[in-house]
């Protein structure tokens, strides 16, 4: 009969790691005698990163002594102690290929239900002293598993483990883990997984996303497939048109006069601009034109200290050539019948203007709200164009706010005085059943999202576009609100040039770095990662151009045009969308 060999607990602590500090509770040690298991934890235990560990669905982590023996043989180590894999319960029996999601067990006075496999996380490798361990746990089908607490009570080493119920779908822990992290997924197993009530919501959501392509739903089915072309291609500047005192629209066409592939309303174009410096800087700009006009239009605001925007708005002339990556981005207009809120501030109007073009091209009776904030009419680009499109829609309304207009200028665009804020938005009486698309400065988008949720709009129905780098994901790392992106410290590298497009950094790859992720961290480019071994795909990044090679093969290759930067190095000059 399975038995409990050890109960292991530990409170979170700061641990030095690669010149940084990680706050983690992965250091667990055996305790002797009875210990109380509660709904969210075991007495004396804690988690440092509660976003990835702990909570009701991940209250207790289990690992098997047979897996200890396996890793002892694999690594040739004889120094392993209970708790070394960060588990709360070291058990004899309960193998990952036999235990199923939803199985229930009684240990001592407490009862538990299996909810999910272990989350792949770099900290188990940090604790064990083997950085590649997160990938090995998956590839060797030995992840361990989490349980939630159905009944609180005391447990202790030596207790028998009694199975009290079987999961409804006979999906083992090992199969569940492979279903998320390994290729060649069985759609039937995915459907089985999402039907198991005990499976944690996070894993349920991941499996629903994996099912979307097969079921013909979601963004993948709505047109967010492969890009229109690989890498960069040359486009000719057809026109440069002033739209306001600070904004200029640049129209781009194919050099041979053919129609450019349609973009999705809300997507952006990434440009390489050789005239603005060497190496040629790379910047991304939202498309402001109708999605299927046969040409692309970007509308660029002149920034006083922006070398690229200054070149594009003051020196670029018709006939010039620019290199462009294919339109991309997930901030896109979705089909539906509910009201649409298009909300922007300043130059943030560009992607929502493209959405307005699409809505006006096929009016279907949807209610459309156009809500925009600017300083005044002289800094309100494309206002007449937006008004003409709104006129073509049978159920539309426009609300414009000017924060610094001169007396008499408000009536010009039927504008209201003041900034577009949370309070002013709530005063409009927006429909709670709407889908909202918000673009502008980061603080503006945060305030507007709060206002929309306060007004009753579902959080999942609020979509926003961030011009700069995505918010970082660095689980457990403390004190990382670093400076603006910059060149890496030390002597310049001699390898291929790596460009972080959103952050505006280009630098040769140095021999001292093991991966693109490490280079990004050295440049203080915002990064996103979790396992650092090519398993979880948190670090997946669009590869706009160039070739990469993997220092260790990922367990599942990313899609074409994507890179797992945690285990990739450049084979040529590369441009990454980060």
Image (cartoon, helix red, strand yellow):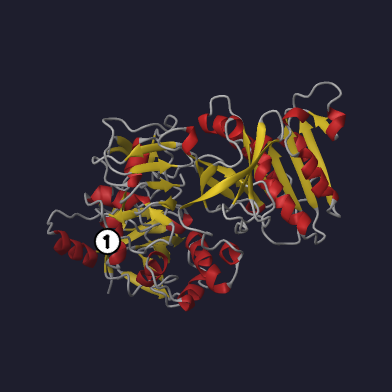
Comparing 497 with 463, the one in front is: 497
User: At 60% across and 68% down in the image, what residue appears?
Assistant: 217
Residue extending farthest top: 407
Q: Secondary structure at mark 1?
A: helix
Q: Residue at the spot x=64%, y=52% of the render?
A: 295
- Which residue is at the front of the view, 547 or 445? 547
The quarter of the rendered structure image containing the N terminus is bottom left
Position in image of residue 29 (x %, y %): 25, 49
Q: Is residue 284 above or below residue 361?
A: above
Counting the numbered discs, the total is 1
Q: Position of residue 340 (x, y in %)?
A: 74, 52
Residue located 19% across and 65% down the image: 70
The quadrant in which residue 108 appears is: bottom left
Q: Nearer the viewer, residue 377 or 40?
A: 377
Pointer 1: what residue? 136
On the picture, is 84 further left or further right than 402? left
């Amino acid at each position: 009969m399975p038995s409990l060999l050890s109960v292991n607990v530990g409170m979170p602590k700061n641990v030095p790691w690669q010149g940084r500090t990680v706050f983690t509770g992965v250091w667990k040690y055996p305790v002797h005698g009875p210990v109380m298991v509660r709904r969210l934890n075991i007495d004396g235990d804690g988690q440092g990163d509660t976003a990835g560990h702990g909570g009701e669905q991940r209250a207790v982590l289990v690992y098997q002594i047979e897996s200890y023996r396996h890793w002892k043989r694999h690594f040739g180590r004889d120094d392993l102690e209970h708790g070394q894999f960060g588990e709360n319960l070291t058990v004899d029996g309960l193998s990952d290929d036999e235990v199923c999601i939803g199985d229930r067990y009684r240990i001592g006075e407490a009862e538990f239900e299996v909810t999910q496999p272990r989350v792949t996380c770099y900290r188990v490798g940090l604790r064990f002293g083997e950085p590649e361990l997160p990938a090995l746990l998956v590839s060797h089908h030995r992840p361990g598993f989490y349980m939630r607490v159905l009944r609180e009570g005391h447990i202790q080493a030596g207790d028998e483990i009694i199975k009290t119920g079987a999961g409804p779908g006979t999906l083992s822990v090992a199969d569940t883990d492979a279903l998320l992290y390994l290729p060649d997924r069985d759609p039937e197993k995915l459907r089985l997984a999402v039907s198991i009530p005990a499976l944690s919501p996070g894993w349920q959501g991941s499996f629903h996303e994996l099912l979307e392509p097969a079921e013909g739903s979601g963004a993948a089915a709505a047109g967010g497939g492969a890009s229109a072309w690989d890498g960069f291609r040359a486009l000719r500047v057809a026109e440069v048109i002033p739209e306001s005192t600070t904004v200029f629209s640049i129209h781009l066409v194919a050099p041979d006069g053919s129609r450019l592939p349609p973009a999705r309303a809300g997507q952006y174009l990434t440009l390489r601009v050789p005239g603005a410096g060497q190496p040629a800087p790379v910047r991304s700009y939202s498309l402001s034109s109708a999605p299927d006009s046969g040409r692309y239009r970007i509308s660029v605001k002149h920034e006083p200290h922006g070398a690229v925007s200054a070149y594009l708005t003051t020196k670029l002339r018709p006939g010039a050539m620019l290199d462009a990556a294919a339109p991309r981005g997930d901030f896109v207009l979705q089909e539906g019948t509910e009201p649409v809120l298009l909300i922007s501030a300043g130059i943030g109007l560009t992607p929502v203007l493209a959405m307005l073009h699409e809505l006006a091209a096929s009016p279907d009776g949807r209610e459309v709200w156009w809500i925009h904030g600017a300083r005044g009419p002289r800094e309100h680009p494309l206002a007449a164009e937006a008004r003409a499109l709104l006129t073509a829609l049978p159920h539309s309304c426009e609300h414009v706010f000017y924060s610094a207009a001169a007396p008499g200028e408000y009536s010009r665009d039927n504008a209201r005085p003041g900034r577009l804020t949370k309070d002013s938005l709530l005063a409009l009486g927006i429909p709670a059943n709407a889908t909202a698309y918000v673009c502008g400065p980061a603080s503006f988008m945060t305030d507007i999202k709060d206002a929309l949720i306060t007004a009753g709009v579902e959080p999942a129905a609020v979509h926003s576009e961030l011009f700069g780098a995505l918010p970082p994901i660095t689980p457990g790392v403390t004190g990382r609100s670093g400076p603006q992106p910059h060149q890496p410290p030390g002597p310049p590298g001699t390898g291929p040039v790596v460009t972080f497009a959103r952050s505006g950094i280009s630098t040769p790859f140095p021999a001292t770095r093991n991966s693109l992720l490490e280079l990004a961290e050295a440049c203080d480019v915002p990064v996103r990662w979790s396992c650092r071994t090519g398993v979880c795909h948190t670090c997946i990044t669009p590869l706009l151009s160039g070739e990469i090679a993997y220092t260790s093969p990922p367990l599942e290759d990313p899609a074409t045009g994507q890179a797992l930067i945690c285990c990739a190095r450049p084979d040529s000059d590369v441009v990454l969308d980060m």
